[in-house]
Amino acid sequence: MVNHHGSGTFSGANGLELYYQSWHPQALARAVLVIVHGHGGHSGIFTRMVEYLTERDYIIFSFDLRGHGRSPGQRGYINSWAEYRADLIAFLKLVKTIKPDFPLFLIGQSMGGTIALDYVLRESAQLSGLILLSPALGLSISPWKLLIGKMLSRILPHFALNTGIDLAAGSRNPEMIAACAQDKLRHQQGTARLATELLQTIDWINTHAREIQIPILILHGGADTITPLKSSQIFFEHLTIADKKMYEYPDSYHELHHDLNYQEVLTDMENWIEKHF
């Protein structure tokens, strides 16, 4: 049982007030975990993960990215990737102020993995480890869409379209797909500016993979049609740090925390965290 659930706001880039949540165990905590969600999601989609980890005495913090969930901003829009980075820097500063004396792990899911990696590579991150769930390290986009996106990003950066991502690609569990469809805080809006900023950031991260110097765990489903497993495999091969681990789940879809084998995934994650205090 979760002993305490908290929520509030903090000031991100350009003074935007972003929504966050925290969950605290009943017993003495062992470490703090900060979750960064993916595109179209929000901080409330990790219920199973939160329950599993708080029962094992971890404190969890997560926030709604700008343009997502309960946070303000145009859905699926950013001016530049630096806004996401500045928001995460501000949030981690808040977390460290609230819970200063605990080992700190950063967890990035899907595009949240891209945000987490960009942060780790560009900032002097004081983290005990980095965990990536189905990170967005490569996207299947046709060349003509890329060209149109780059043009629109310059001319009409706020122009939005439905991403066309099928909710059924998230999980093999029909109940979870139905719950996602009913979740009014989720969205499927994407802008040309966000697309070009994301792709540029992915390219930059892949170029600088060798510079990562903190323990890293990657978990990815083999049947993921949103962020290809191959992109994580290539990234993992380029990592030079000795303390790296990757788990592949052959039949799993994109949202590992919602899929049929979520308990296996969470057990693998928690076992890795326990070895990295």
Image (tube, rainbow, N blue to C red):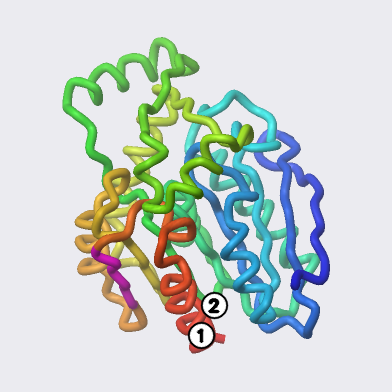
Magenta span: helix, strand or loop, mainly?
strand
Query: Residue 275: percent from the left, percent from the top?
Result: 49, 89
The answer to whether residue 51 is above or below residue 255 is below
Among numbered discs 1 and 2, the one appearing first in the sequence: 2
Q: Mark 1 near mark 2, Cβ–Cβ under 8 Å?
A: yes
- Tell me the residue at 74%/80% (across/down): 101
Confirm whether residue 214 shows in the render.
no
- Tell me the residue at 39%/72% (across/down): 217
- Tell me the residue at 68%/51% (across/down): 90
Label 1: which residue? 276
Kind of residue at badge 1: His
Looking at this view, name the residue that lies furthest to the front.
Answer: 174
Residue 249: say if magenta: yes
- Of residues 68 and 264, which is closer to you in this image? 264
- Of residues 236 and 58, which is closer to you in this image? 58
Q: Quadrant of the N terminus?
A: bottom right
The answer to whether residue 271 is above or below residue 60 is below
Badge 1 marks a residue whose secondary structure is loop
Looking at this view, name the residue that lies furthest to the top.
Answer: 155
For residue 128, the mark is: 2
The answer to whether residue 106 is above or below residue 36 is below
Badge 2 marks a residue whose secondary structure is loop
Quarter of image, res 25: bottom right
- The residue carrying pointer 1 sits among few (fewer than 14), some (14 to 19) or many (20 or more) residues within 10 Å by Cα, namely few
Residue 23: say if magenta: no
For the record, the magenta segment spans 245-250
